[in-house]
Image (tube, grey):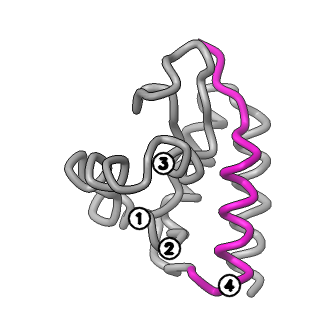
Amino acid sequence: MTITLNSDALDKAESLIRAGRVVRDERDDWSEDAPSAADENAFIEKHGYAEYAKWHLGVDKSQGEETKGRYSFPFGDFSRLHRCAIISLESRAAQHDHDSIARAAKKLLDRVDGE
């Protein structure tokens, strides 16, 4: 399993920050703020996997294109970027040696905290 940085998702996250569509929540809030499986399915049904992918900094190209298993490291609720999601995914990415994703998350967090 090789998870790489999803540059389209990074662009999406940066555009959300520029637009001010950010929830400045705390580290442990992501477990409550993360979309449920039903929310994910509804989003995919309405917008498709290409849009779903843009909400995940990680992509595993060994997984099928139209599977949720292809995408990892979510950063928002399909409307706004969540600070707590960035904190969580930065930590998980670093723990699992996904260095490019961890670095991207750190830069996003710096931008969120700096604005």
Q: Are marks 2 and 1 in contact (CB under 8 Å)?
A: yes
At 38% across and 61% down in the image, what residue appears? Answer: 30
| Disc number placed over residue 80 in the picture, else none | 2
- Residue type at the position of mark 4: Ala
First in residue order: circle 4 vs circle 3: 4
> What span is colored magenta in the figure?
1-21
- Residue type at the position of mark 1: Asp
Q: Classify residue 46 by image quadrant.
A: bottom left
Instruction: Please tell me how crowded label 1 is: few (under 14), some (14-19), or many (20+) other residues with Cα within 10 Å.
Output: some
Question: Which one is nearer the viewer's eye here, 76 or 46?
Answer: 46
At 40% across and 32% down in the image, what residue appears? Answer: 68
Q: Is residue 12 above or below residue 52?
A: below
Cα–Cα span, label 4 and label 2: 10 Å
Q: Dot 1 lies on which element?
A: loop
First in residue order: circle 4 vs circle 1: 4
Residue bearing the label numbered 3: 52
Q: Is residue 23 above or below residue 8?
A: below
First in residue order: circle 4 vs circle 2: 4
Question: Which one is nearer the viewer's eye here, 31 or 45?
Answer: 45
| Disc number placed over residue 19 in the picture, else none | 4
| Disc number placed over residue 77 in the picture, else none | 1
Picture coordinates of residue 49, whole percent (x, y) = 47, 41
Cα–Cα span, label 3 and label 2: 13 Å
Q: Dot 2 lies on which element?
A: loop
Cα–Cα span, label 2 and label 1: 6 Å
Instruction: Please tell me how crowded label 3 is: few (under 14), some (14-19), or many (20+) other residues with Cα within 10 Å.
Output: many
- Residue type at the position of mark 3: Tyr
Q: Are marks 4 and 3 in contact (CB under 8 Å)?
A: no
- Residue type at the position of mark 2: Arg
First in residue order: circle 3 vs circle 2: 3
